[in-house]
Amino acid sequence: MKWIYEQFHDLADVCELVPVPEDIVHDPCFAFRVNDTPYKERPNVRVVLKGAGAGKSVIFNAHADVVAALENQECSFEPKIKDGRMYGRGTCDDKAQIAVLWSICKAFKKLGIKPNGNVILHFVIEEVTGGNGTLAMMRRGEKADCSIILGPCSNNICTSVKGAVCFCGTFYGNSKNNGYPQVTVSALKLAEEAMRIIEEYHDELLAETINDNPLFARHRDPMPVTFGQLTAGDWESSVPQKAVLKGVFGLLTTPKEQAMKEIKERIKTRGSEWLSTNFDMMYRYCHDASIIDPGLPFVQALTDSYRLMNVQSKTDVMTASTDAWFYTNVLGIPGLMTGCGDLCNAYSCCENVALEGLTMESAVLTQFIKEWCGIRES
Amino acid sequence: MVSQEKILQVCDDLLVDTAIFLMRLVQFESISSHEGPAMDWIYEQFKDISDECEKIDVSEDIVKDPDYAFRIDNRPYKGRPNVRAVLKGDGTGKSTIFNAHVDVVPPSKGQNRPFDPYVDEGILYGRGACDDKGQVAILWTLFKALKKLGVRLKGDVILHLVIEEETGGNGTLAMIRSGEKADCCINLEPCSNNILTSVRGAVWFTSTFYGRAGHSGSSETTVSALDMAIEAINIIKEYHDELLGKTINDDPFFSRYTNPMPVTFGQNEGGDWPAMAPQKQVFKGVFGFLTTPKEEVMSELEKRIKTRGPAWLRDNFEISFQYRHDTSINNPELPFVKTLANCYKAMGVKSEIGAMPASTDLWFYTNILGIPGLVTGCGNLMDAHTSKEQVILKDIIISAAVLTLFVKEWCGIEAA
């Protein structure tokens, strides 16, 4: 983040390190603490190209944190360029998007132009772990006419962004020597049972809500449930006494509080008797869906910008949960997601982004700023 | 002549000494591959009460033996010998090998004082109390009692006190490869004093499944290794159920159980991030079987995962087998079995002939060396490997008395 601050320092009217207070952990929207690393020394960065006051303003958000590299990932933190693509962890999620914003600022400086409305950049920490960085920015307060959250969207304009709850279930069995299966209760079996119950709830909710918005219905499953981690047992021949299951449950229009309650309730009441009293369920982060009207003027301005730059783009739904809801739902600033790079690359062992796509995205967003904020010569 | 009352009295008198012996033995943190100090101590405890007592080094070459199970870690075998103790007969009687193991499984989560045993109302609690250190204590009491009784044996009583039973029997394997002959073998494990002439086989497996990692939002392009693992678990369960249906009636003792050959998925681990479809999932477990040869089981498990799962699974998994024990089935009408049954009866101990629903080292003696055998012992199998592992001290004494009587009847003795 300090390096990012250095890169934007001379390109903007305002460039500040925004410390994240340690007591963010007590905020009701705080996700979870990954480890004990203090927030001191890990600030967000806020950059502003100041408008003259006459135009409309926009916040762009991009995150600097990444998920860990995979075991077989060749280029994780030593990026390589091959055939016009850059490979490395974070290339599309989300560092290419930061690069897009940097090149816009560079372009403005080079062209000697300024926006008529404020162009505000929020570079944040801890997006992949639930949005604690954006939460901190939001609690400071910010005003704008719209927000654009950048992520690998294949240049689509995602006016609907799914919600999600990230859950961690712990299941307790009754371990005996594997010679007596009829009196043992395997914690792994309990976790499997809970997985089926959660999947069933997912399928019901999908059927109930997929048609709440025409964009959702374009996808077979815009609110997937992912069981990302399962650990159970200590010894090959001992029935597991404890199993821990972590994952993400996607949501469309269902409020997150309802989903959290229902998941717990269903495991309690629809599983076996042992399961009902031998599990804990906690939630690590909870995002509501962010849904805005695709007819809003700023959406139209962005659509026009993509078309003008000859970049294929359509209005769509984002099937991953992001920080968009903080702006739309909490601050009341309508937000959408867009960006270069493909979501199917994010988190993969060969994450990459096409460099040409990056430069085209910069051109599109510069055009958007011209349309939406208006520009003047400096 | 030595009466059974005398035997019982001599063993009874050893209750305190036996308790002290067992408490000390349980204190050794002899998790498999860490048995060295315990074996050194056991050698010291047996050397003055045996006619022969030796530490038998396990050669590092054991890893190349076709029946070697697996290496739990890189700890060398040097310094971790088996112990062989013998009370020699004059050659006119029948001989017996007794086998018990000194290694234990790691403590269970939440187990209070696993290696700091305590006694409460005559029950000793600690890791290995019944599996299998309580059985080692029986053998120590047996030898002490025979010494105290001052008898001359007609047949040899041979003790194999071994390492690495819990991880597949590498200790017993080393003992049998050095050659041993006897008329019968009694393998001591917690059996509630029953006489188990049928012991199921088992293979331990490790399966690794590979997926295609990706963001939770890209469910259509990712392949979850966890989903693949679950598919395989279901395939394995299906094979288990078929095999159970086909073989449960092959032996009348196995058929007394609903499931004498359970499959246990003991460990399961995978995934890097809650919101990321897992790229790799590993599960480890035990697949029990009855009369099916182990080679057939291993081949069939691999084949079924390859052919009965989704297309992705076929080329994106590995399976390997760690320990591999065949079933051991012995004729319950054999004289040594009947002799032991009579000894339990004579000592007023309830005992039935049956099957062991867990795998042990017995098959090394019966299937490889051709020595008929059985499993018996005090303590309850349901306590083994749990956080409440325990043994009733008095039961050790009574078991020792039973085995002393068995030695008298089977091996034959003369008063000195």
Image: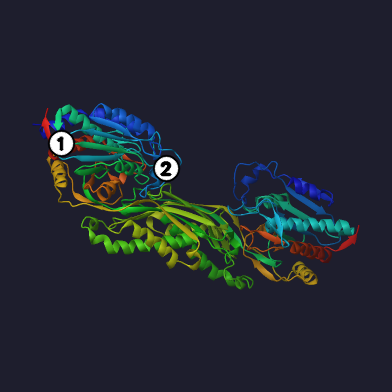
Q: Residues within 10 Å of mark 1 (few under 14, many from 20)?
A: few
Is tag 2's residue or tag 1's residue first in the polypeptide sequence? Answer: 1
The count of marks equals: 2
* Residue B319, label in figure: none
Q: Quadrant of residue B341?
A: top left
Of badges 2 and 1, nearer the viewer stands 1
Instruction: Give the left or right position of residue A186, taking residue A53 as reference.
Output: left
Q: Which residue is mark 2?
A: B109
Pick whichever, B238 or B166, lies toward us. B166
| Residue that appears at 17% across and 34% down | B89
Q: Quadrant of residue A118?
A: bottom right
Camera sees residue A244:
no
Q: Which residue is mark 1?
A: B91
Q: Residues within 10 Å of mark 2 (few under 14, many from 20)?
A: few
Instruction: Give the left or right position of residue A234, taking residue A336 as reference.
Output: left
Q: Are marks 2 and 1 on the same chain?
A: yes
SS for callout 2: loop
In percent of width and height, residue B193 lies at 21, 43
Q: Chain of mark 1?
A: B
The kind of residue on which mark 1 rests is Gly
The kind of residue on which mark 2 rests is Lys
Q: Chain of mark 2?
A: B
Instruction: Give the left or right position of residue A115, taking residue A64 as reference.
Output: right
User: How far apart are the two marked residues, 2 and 1, measured between alpha carbons?
Assistant: 49 Å
Pick whichever, B349 or B331, lies toward us. B331
Q: Is residue B65 above or below residue B278?
A: above
Q: Is residue A151 above or below residue A208?
A: above
In percent of width and height, residue A72 lies at 59, 54
Residue extending furthest toward the right: A377
SS for callout 1: loop
